[in-house]
Image (cartoon, rainbow, N blue to C red):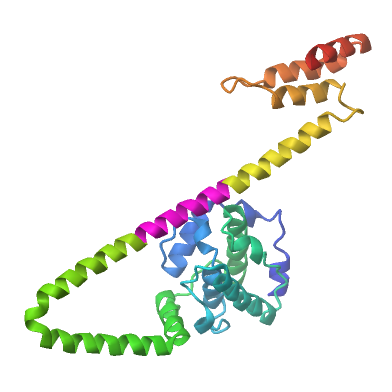
Amino acid sequence: MATMAANIGMMDGAYFVGRSEILAWVNATLQLNISRVEEAASGAIQCQMMDMTHPGIVPMHKVNFDAKTEYDMIQNYKVLQEVFTKLKIEKHIEVNKLVKGRPLDNLEFLQWLKRYCDSVNGGIMNENYNPVERRCKGGKERNPRGAQRVAKSLQADNVANLALGPKQGRMCSMSGRDDSASEIQALSEQVSDLKHSVDQLEKERDFYFAKLRDIEILSQTPEIEHLPVAAAIRKILYAADVKESALSEAQELVTSMHSSPEEEVNDTEQIVQ
């Protein structure tokens, strides 16, 4: 098992599996309905995939399928790492990146996971595995006292409903308030998701801007700043017209490398000016 996992390198075909195929695989295997790879950031899906591939190896009662905070997510990844250790799988889990919900990191981990699971079961789903039942059992074992409190509360509500009779109007009013509270909670969750998406976009923007800034600084290095290729790079970086690409002009500058030295100097001076 460890050998199979170790052979899954970055150039393996696993990492060329598309996002849609990965989502379809997760949903079909675990009977879920996720639409984004970021929804696997909690680590619960990965734990259950290992539970399906190696029945009984994962302590499902420790897996939190409702994990929302990074702390709860990290606990799931600790369970997953313990499973890897038991199976002697030498796979480093980038927990700090995964819990941030970064699409690329979560996609790559799911791609690796699919490749690993397929290498164990030949890509055939375990027909005897009931993913919904396993999740429910995990939830019951994870919080048995809470389940008992809920059951007692429901019993008390049933008794109260039989005795209230004329107070149904008040109960309807309370039900209306509950519906409003549910709507507010749903809207709050949507706002939270939007904020999270904005944060991810800002991080990606800063990441690519930093790369462009590094290229700009490199092109201004005294050793190469007068070369046509450096001038061509700056031409693209400083292009102000968003509708037209500066690539053709940059390519013309690069072809000037075949000109005489005197022509190169003159061309470069014109560009800098």
Q: Nearer the viewer, residue 43 or 165?
A: 165
Picture quadrant of residue 221: top right
Q: Nearer the viewer, residue 45 or 198?
A: 198
Residue 157 at x, y percent in the picture: 21, 85
| Res. 80 visible in picture | yes
Position of residue 116 in the picture relative to residue 194 (left or right): right
Q: Is residue 220 magenta?
A: no
Q: Which residue lies at the image location 64% right of the left edge and 66% below the top edge?
A: 95
Q: Which residue lies at the image location 81% right of the left edge and 24% below the top edge?
A: 229
Q: How many marks?
A: 0
Q: Residue furthest left?
A: 166
Magenta-colored segment: predominant secondary structure = helix
Picture quadrant of residue 12: bottom right
Position of residue 183 in the picture relative to residue 210 (left or right): left
Residue 85 at x, y percent in the picture: 69, 79
Quarter of the figure with the C terminus: top right
Picture quadrant of residue 119: bottom right
Position of residue 220 in the picture relative to residue 119 (left or right): right
Q: Which residue lies at the image location 67% right of the left edge and 45% below the top edge?
A: 207
Position of residue 271 in the picture relative to residue 125 (left or right): right
**Residues in magenta, as a range:** 186-201
Q: Is residue 195 magenta?
A: yes
